[in-house]
Image (cartoon, rainbow, N blue to C red):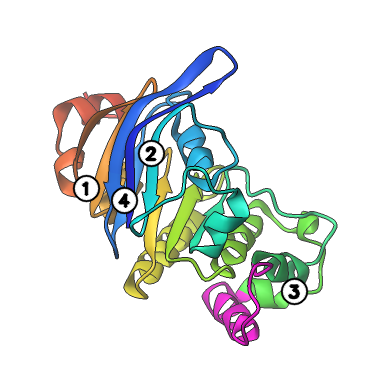
Amino acid sequence: MLEVRDLHSAYGRIVVLKGVSLRVDPGEVVALIGSNGAGKTTLLRALSGVQPICGGEISFRGERIDRLPPHRRVERGMTQSPEGRQVFGPLTVDDNLRLGAYMRRDDGIEADRERVFGMFPILREKRHLAAGGLSGGQQQMLAIGRALMGRPKLLLLDEPSLGLSPLLVDQILAAIVALKAEGITVLLVEQNATAALEIADRGYVLETGSIASSGTGAALLSDPKVKAAYLGAD
């Protein structure tokens, strides 16, 4: 579904992505782990089109998209729940969800909103409240729900568990597993490497802008180097 080949990206003279290559197959959950500053968020932003690239190729469902603007990538089925949630605080929960469907002109928008409410019932209760007044966990649910309103074939999730309680982390991870069961492909960036690899089919380790290792989720969980660097093991 997604193929990234030799991707480079920079902020001014600071090169952040240095020849990243990876793939995501249909129906997979693929985890991208690495330390702070490794380039994980930059990679997702480059895939979405909001971060310029200076080399390499991005193909989505067999089509080169690296020259397409962000809204055209959404149109083709790639949506993102960004790091830090970035909900529209003054707008209601309902309005945030409707904005997630801004590229759509079909009759399924209301049904998809009901689907989001079914996944995250608290959002139904808060639907008429300003998003800025929600708790951190509720805002994360809203950010994921807003991305789902674009009816993605590939969902990019950037640090969905950041700052959440263990109970809410479990809830978010369970939602990701449920999305996979519905046929949605997920590329997951997550600081909680153990939790991410436990639900992932495959994973990549990003170190200082380059892919350092890759493998199945289970293989990376048992890799001594990955354990020592990212899983809190000796």
Amino acid beneath label 2: Glu
Q: What residue does disc 2 label?
A: 57
Q: What residue does disc 3 label?
A: 127
Seen from the viewer's position, the closer of residues 50 and 66 is 66
Choose the circle earlier in sequence order: 3 or 2.
Answer: 2
Choose the circle earlier in sequence order: 4 or 3.
Answer: 4
The percent coordinates of residue 228 (x first, y second) are 24, 25
Q: Secondary structure at mark 2?
A: strand
User: Which quarter of the picture shows residue 153?
Assistant: bottom left
Q: Do tag 2 and tag 4 residues touch (Cβ < 8 Å)?
A: no
Amino acid beneath label 4: Val
- Residue 198 makes an appearance in the image: yes
Seen from the viewer's position, the closer of residues 117 and 146 is 146
Above/below status of 215 relative to 139: above
Q: Residues within 10 Å of mark 3 (few under 14, many from 20)?
A: some
Seen from the viewer's position, the closer of residues 83 and 45 is 45
Magenta region: which residues? 101-121
Q: Based on the picture, tell me whether residue 217 belongs to the magenta stretch.
A: no
Above/below status of 208 relative to 224: above
Q: Quadrant of the C terminus?
A: top left
Q: What residue does disc 1 label?
A: 217
- Mark 2 or 1, which is nearer the eye? 2
Q: What residue does disc 4 label?
A: 30
The percent coordinates of residue 69 (x first, y second) are 60, 48
Choose the circle earlier in sequence order: 2 or 1.
Answer: 2
Q: Residues within 10 Å of mark 4 (few under 14, many from 20)?
A: many
